[in-house]
Image: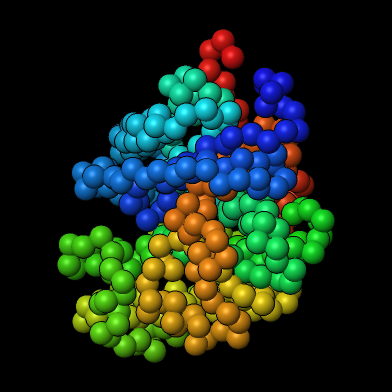
């Protein structure tokens, strides 16, 4: 690795994230030494076309085969197109697209060729962030918590707080910013809370041909079916102690639970299930958070946000309330993690993924001649 990367000074790192919502690629630059955030840089977004989304949907849950190969081509092309727009980048964090996630069985699969991307961009690319964590007994997810710790420090937090990402799947990071480092005992606890936007998106796609319940308009007209909600909360996942993680389709049967409901009631019930999963998850935290900062697409759903506010005994706010960008936080996280991987620093620990030892997961690919 280039000495300019391996040092301890601040780098301009570009991160990219394609999440389980399958809407597109987020990209964001931060300046960091792998410990603290020095500056937030430019951002970009490249949506997937309807045809590309169909290719990606066809590959979900698959580990190999022509569908996976087709999805890989979509991911590689979309990332190359978007990331080429950025200039003066020292290092890139490339998450790829998760197609399948079963850490206790087959492992975890994120498609995307980081080595080819490094050649295309002419910059070092860190990728395949999750495999090493899984090999060492971890869940391989969530991976943003170390970045959440840096964010908590950046906003000047002093007491415990939570970062709740509501993408396709919900995940929660509980942070004690008084600890010295993210890997210090008691600094972090992280896990997936349950399904979030994915089943809602799938419902409205199947029934109405839309990509999402825009602004929660459909759910706002419905009511939560308590019987379906009780069946959902009876799932053993919610009583499992964290760390724990989910695949996008682990709760696919949720749509069957609301199959006999009208569109509005079905959307309201799935939205209520997402909020209930978060409420159950907070019971695992070492202490109640003083505030819950929400990131991801779910923060734009006023029905979901109100459900959280009336259910929880803490402030529930979008991360924009503290000056962060809820659309780009995960892309920024992989920029931050790329610097840590390149410098031999940990990216996950026992309380974030359940990994047996501190691990800095990721493959570093450099362009030819670097």
Q: Could you tell whether 364 is left or right of 96 in the image?
A: right
Q: Could you tell whether 337 is left or right of 43 in the image?
A: right
Percent position (x, y) of residue 245? 56, 59
Between 298 and 355, the residue placed more toward the observer is: 298
Q: Could you tell whether 127 is left or right of 61 in the image?
A: right
Q: In this view, does 42 lie above or below 330?
A: above
Percent position (x, y) of residue 47? 30, 46
Numbered disc total = 0
| Residue 164: quadrant of the picture | bottom right
Between 298 and 69, the residue placed more toward the observer is: 298
Q: In this view, does 333 lie above or below 199?
A: above
Residue at (28%, 68%) from the top-left corner? 214
Q: Is residue 205 above or below residue 363?
A: below
Residue at (21%, 82%) from the top-left corner? 262
Percent position (x, y) of residue 10? 68, 36
- Which quarter of the figure is the C terminus placed in? top right
Between 368 and 67, the residue placed more toward the observer is: 368
Residue at the extreme top: 369
Residue 193 can be seen in this image: no
Residue 277 can be seen in this image: yes
Q: Is residue 76 above or below residue 2?
A: below
Between 17 and 29, the residue placed more toward the observer is: 29
| Residue 83: quadrant of the picture | top left
Residue at (52%, 53%) from the top-left corner? 329
- Which quarter of the figure is the N terminus placed in? top right
């Amino acid at each position: 690795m280039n000495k300019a990367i391996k040092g301890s000074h601040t780098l301009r790192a570009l991160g990219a994230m394609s999440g389980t919502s399958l809407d597109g690629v987020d990209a964001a630059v931060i300046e960091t030494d792998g410990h603290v955030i020095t500056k937030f840089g430019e951002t970009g977004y490249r949506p997937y076309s309807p045809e590309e989304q169909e290719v990606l949907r066809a590959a979900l849950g698959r580990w190999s085969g022509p569908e996976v190969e087709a999805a890989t081509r979509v991911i590689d092309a979309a990332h190359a197109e978007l990331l080429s727009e950025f200039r003066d980048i020292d290092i890139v964090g490339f998450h790829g697209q998760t197609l399948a996630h079963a850490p206790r069985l087959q492992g975890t699969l994120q498609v995307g060729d980081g080595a080819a991307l490094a050649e295309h961009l002419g910059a070092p690319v860190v990728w395949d962030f999750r495999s090493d964590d899984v090999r060492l007994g971890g869940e391989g997810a969530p991976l943003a918590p170390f970045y959440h710790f840096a964010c908590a420090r950046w906003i000047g937090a002093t007491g415990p707080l939570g970062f709740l990402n509501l993408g396709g799947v919900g995940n929660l990071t509980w942070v004690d910013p008084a600890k010295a480092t993210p890997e210090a005992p008691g600094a972090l606890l992280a896990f997936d809370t349950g399904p979030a936007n994915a089943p809602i998106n799938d419902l409205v796609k199947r029934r109405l041909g839309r990509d999402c319940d825009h602004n929660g308009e459909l759910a706002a007209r419905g009511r939560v079916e308590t019987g379906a909600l009780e069946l959902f909360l009876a799932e053993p996942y919610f009583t499992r102690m964290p760390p724990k993680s989910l695949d996008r389709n682990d709760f696919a049967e949720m749509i069957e639970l609301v199959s006999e409901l009208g569109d509005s009631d079905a959307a309201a019930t799935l939205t209520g299930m997402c909020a209930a999963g978060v409420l159950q998850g907070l019971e695992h935290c070492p202490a109640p958070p003083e505030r819950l900062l929400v990131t991801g697409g779910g923060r734009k759903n006023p029905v979901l946000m109100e459900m959280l506010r009336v259910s929880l005994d803490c402030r529930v706010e979008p991360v924009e309330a503290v000056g962060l960008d809820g659309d780009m936080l995960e892309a920024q996280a992989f920029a931050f993690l790329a610097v840590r991987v390149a410098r031999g620093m940990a990216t996950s620990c026992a309380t974030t993924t359940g990994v047996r030892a501190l691990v800095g997961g990721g493959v570093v690919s450099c362009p030819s001649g670097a």
